[in-house]
Amino acid sequence: MTLDFRQLQIIEAVARLGSVTRAAEELGLSQPAVSMQLKQIEERVGLPLLRRSGRLFVATEAGEEIVRSARQVAQTLADLDDALHRLRGLERGHLRLGVVSTANYFLPDYLVAFRRRHPGITVTLHVANRDQVVQALEDNLVEIAIIGRPPDSSELFATRFMDNPLVVIAPPDHPLACDPDTAAAPISLNRLALEPFVMREPGSGTRAAFERVLAAAGVRVQHACVLASNEAVKQAVQAGLGLAVISAQTVETELQLGRLVTLNVAGFPILRQWFVVHRAQRQLSPGARAFRELLRESRHGSDGGPRRVPVVASSA
């Protein structure tokens, strides 16, 4: 039995994405071509490699073996590519970066600065929630990641580079925002628990941080709805669906325009950190090392937000 690298890529993509259509789009193939390849691969292997689970495809035990091998082969080729780029320096290369969605609000400044310093390095961005980004890092789908809370793992190395304060937001006409007493004394968590909350999805670092604060205080809040993006959360709060806890870095524009306000709540802001994370045992490519150093150069201002990164010419 012999499988070529393209066939390994197809099995891995379908198993990871759970969809033939999405795998075809990612690989630049037609859906019928992917379906035909899957059939031929299973005939060649002599075992079922994928099975239906609801609307998604998941790998069988044999499929998992092929997926693991596919990722090992892909990693070996990526390591070879990185080694060649190290020999060439920073003139060419590829940076595979994983970030949680909240980081999208400050990341463009860093990407612009990085591209100006190193125009020959291509950046591929994988955006997901915290759990998914960590999984992508562990599966070697990304080389470095930006997350708000690093996992407790000896296999991953994390470096803090910026503050990430979490605040409680409300529409400007909310009773708690209009109450003059709240300006003098913080709102208690028990009082806050009487209000419905717009929550991020399970796996979100922001949600996990808020839930840890609630658990420590022995308080539970009502979930008005659960949404999978910061933009959706902000829109829901503006519409009056409830309050929300969100990174202060994501609501700067709405606060300036008066569309949202932050509430004076006891124990807030929750001061979190941004971390750049990579596998401890892996030698980073020149591009990944350069981007990590760019993040380390940053310093947060008095408001907890990132300052602009200085743009300098590459010495490579």
Image (tube, helix red, strand yellow):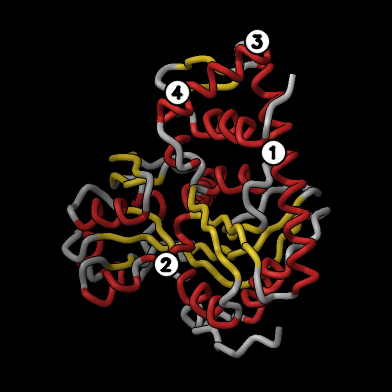
Label 1, on which residue?
71
Precedes in sequence: disc 3 or disc 4:
3
Q: Locate the C terminus and report the quarter of the image it occupies.
A: bottom right
Precedes in sequence: disc 2 or disc 4:
4
Per the model, the C-alpha gap separating discs 1 and 3 is 20 Å
Label 4, on which residue?
56
Per the model, the C-alpha gap separating discs 1 and 2 is 31 Å
Per the model, the C-alpha gap separating discs 2 and 4 is 31 Å
Q: Amino acid at mark 1?
A: Arg
Q: Is residue 39 above or below residue 125?
A: above
Per the model, the C-alpha gap separating discs 4 and 1 is 20 Å
Q: Residue at x 63, y 77 (%)?
A: 294
Regarding mark 4 in the picture, which secondary structure is present there? strand
Q: Amino acid at mark 3?
A: Leu
Q: Which mark is residue 47?
A: 3
Tell which residue pokes out farthest to the right in this image.
281
Q: How many marks?
A: 4
